[in-house]
Image: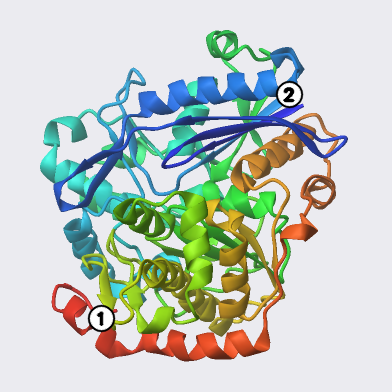
């Protein structure tokens, strides 16, 4: 048995995987608190992650009906880009700034200027740093919390911190590290000179975790943690990775051709590549994968948070919202929503706000508003998919995950807008499943057995054929006209007035 953990923005999810049968035997979850503030502050207390880890694990074990002593390995997936700072005693210095935190946008602009803009950042790092990346959070901490900055002994990403808590070892793997903004995705090494720009004394460089291969284990559970979680004290902790990297494994996206699309709080689209084919477009992040290759990816900042905001505004439950989406026509009767409630990364509008276009006395209905937010968020993903396709990525089909994928209407909208067939895994918690599969892979390496990741994915990643969707040519053609309206530059005129840099 293997335990997969996904520590996300909204909560922690856990599952128990039997790799011999390929079945998920039990699942659990626990919520996180979000600390919000002015100027785009989005933070969490890492202590909440530990409590949620314990609660979710207990639920999963109970549902599975297995003893914790049967767990041979643990894999951890974590939200990317977050910053966890520890002192010399291993204590957390301040709340973790998250991927969706834009408070450090000014610091990111300063660093990007030093790198020579998007093109210079792409040339040096293989990615164009964005406000959500970790590196700007370090500069922000130096300038706004110098007393905290002076005590930094360890710089960790969220999943790195959980691995540290489990094992006492500070290390990182290539996939999650490539979203930090101080990592070269081509050479798979830290860019220490960039950190020395922030801290010429070298303390940040000394605080970097050790880099390990994705198929390696971090170590064995610490005895006190094994006792707290009720797990096998000899269980091994895998390298783990970022949530998108683990989601790729959990959808079997470990070879060219497949596209994984996540309809979560944020929206992501990513594919597997065997070489670091860095796109000239700065909004495509050519991250490393956690399966030995690379993971070209785009991320939108707004998805189910936007649809949730409309549901809350109109006082709708999920079922009623979905029914209203289905009642409205393609194009929502002319209502178009730019759903940039959290600013936006794709397109690059970090200071943008959301807006509705085309409202008239005739089309201002609940159904059209519901349809407009679903279409608007999905158009953002289509824009990202177009960028991936332009960089040479094949897209034979889409593997759809995330909360939005539970809606049959939304699945069909995705198939029609993308013009590609949609398949849904049986287990929608793809990041937690991927973490459990990776744990089995890493443990086998530790014991010299070397199980094939391909074979593990083939056995454990199963698809629910009843939830698939095929694109309809007529609907796809109708959506194309609405999508081109979404792409019109005039739509962004009022947004650009508030931007400090161009798209």
Give the image location of residue 137, x and y in percent: 26, 48
Check the image and report above or below for 192 versus 88. below
* Image quarter of the C terminus: bottom left
Most foreground residue, 451 or 495: 495
Q: Nearer the viewer, residue 390 or 146?
A: 390
> In the depicted view, which residue is nearer to us: 324 or 276?
324
Q: Residue furthest front?
A: 362
Label 2 secondary element? helix
Query: Which disc, if any, is residue 308?
Result: none
Q: Nearer the viewer, mark 2 or mark 1?
A: 1
Snapshot quadrant of residue 138 = top left
Distance Cα–Cα, label 2 vs label 1: 54 Å
How was the colour assigned to the protein in this rendering?
Answer: rainbow
Q: Is residue 105 visible?
A: yes
Residue 335: give x, y in percent of width and height: 35, 79
Q: Is residue 65 left or right of residue 20?
A: left
Q: Which residue is mark 1?
A: 361
- Label 1: which secondary element: loop
Q: Is any part of residue 289 visible from this angle?
A: no
Q: Earlier in the sequence, mark 2 or mark 1?
A: 2
Judge left or right: residue 501 versus residue 316: left
Residue 117, image x, y percentages: 28, 74
> At 62% from the left edge and 11% from the top edge, which residue is drawn?
230
**Eyeballing the image, is 312 above or below 374?**
above
- Is the C-beta separation of discs 2 and 1 under 8 Å? no
Q: Which residue is mark 2?
A: 64
Q: Reply above or below: 446 against 451.
A: above
Q: Residues within 10 Å of mark 2 (few under 14, many from 20)?
A: some
**Residue 27 placement (x, y as % from top left):** 65, 31
């Amino acid at each position: 048995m293997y335990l997969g953990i996904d520590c996300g923005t909204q909560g922690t999810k856990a599952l128990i995987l039997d790799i011999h049968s390929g079945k998920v035997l039990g699942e659990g979850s626990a919520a996180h608190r979000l600390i919000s503030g002015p100027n785009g502050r989005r933070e969490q207390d890492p202590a909440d992650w530990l409590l949620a880890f314990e609660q979710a694990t207990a639920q999963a074990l109970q549902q599975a009906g297995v003893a914790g002593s049967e767990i041979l390995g643990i894999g951890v997936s974590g939200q990317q880009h977050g910053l966890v700072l520890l002192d010399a005693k291993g204590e957390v210095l301040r709340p973790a700034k998250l991927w969706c935190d834009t408070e450090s946008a000014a610091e990111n602009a300063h660093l990007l200027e030093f790198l020579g803009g998007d093109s210079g950042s792409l040339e040096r790092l293989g990615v164009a740093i964005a406000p959500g990346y970790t590196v700007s959070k370090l500069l922000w901490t130096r300038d706004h919390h110098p007393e905290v900055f002076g005590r930094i002994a360890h710089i960790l990403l969220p999943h790195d911190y959980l691995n540290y808590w489990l094992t006492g070892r500070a290390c990182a793997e290539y996939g999650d590290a490539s979203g930090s903004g101080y990592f070269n995705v081509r050479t798979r090494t830290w860019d220490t000179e960039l950190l020395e720009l922030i801290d010429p004394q070298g303390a940040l460089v000394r605080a970097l975790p050790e880099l390990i291969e994705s198929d390696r284990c971090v170590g064995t559970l610490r005895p006190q943690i094994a006792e707290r979680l009720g797990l096998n004290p000899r269980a091994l902790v895998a390298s783990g990775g970022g949530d998108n990297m683990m989601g790729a494994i959990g959808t079997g996206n470990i070879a060219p051709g497949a596209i994984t699309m996540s309809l979560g709080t944020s929206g992501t689209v990513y594919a597997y590549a065997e070489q670091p084919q860095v796109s000239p477009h700065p909004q495509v992040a050519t991250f490393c994968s956690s399966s030995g290759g690379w993971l070209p990816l785009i991320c939108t900042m707004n998805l189910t948070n936007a649809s949730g905001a409309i549901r809350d505004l109109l006082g709708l439950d999920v079922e009623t919202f979905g029914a209203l989406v289905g009642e409205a026509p393609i194009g929502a009767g002319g209502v178009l929503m730019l759903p940039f409630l959290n600013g936006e990364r794709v397109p690059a509008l970090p200071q943008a706000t959301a807006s509705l276009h085309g409202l008239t006395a005739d089309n201002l209905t609940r159904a059209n508003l519901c349809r407009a937010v679903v279409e608007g968020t999905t158009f953002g993903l289509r824009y990202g998919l177009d960028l991936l396709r332009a960089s040479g990525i094949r897209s034979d089909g889409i593997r759809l995950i995330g909360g939005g994928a539970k809606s049959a209407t939304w699945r069909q909208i995705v198939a029609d807008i993308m013009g590609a067939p949609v398949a849904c895994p049986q287990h929608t918690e793809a990041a937690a499943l991927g973490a459990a599969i990776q744990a089995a892979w890493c443990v086998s390496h530790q014991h010299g057995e070397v199980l094939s990741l391909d074979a593990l994915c083939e056995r454990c990643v199963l698809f629910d054929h009843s939830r698939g969707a095929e694109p309809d040519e007529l609907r796809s053609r109708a959506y194309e006209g609405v999508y081109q309206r979404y792409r019109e530059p005039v739509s962004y005129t009022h947004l650009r007035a508030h931007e400090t840099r161009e798209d």
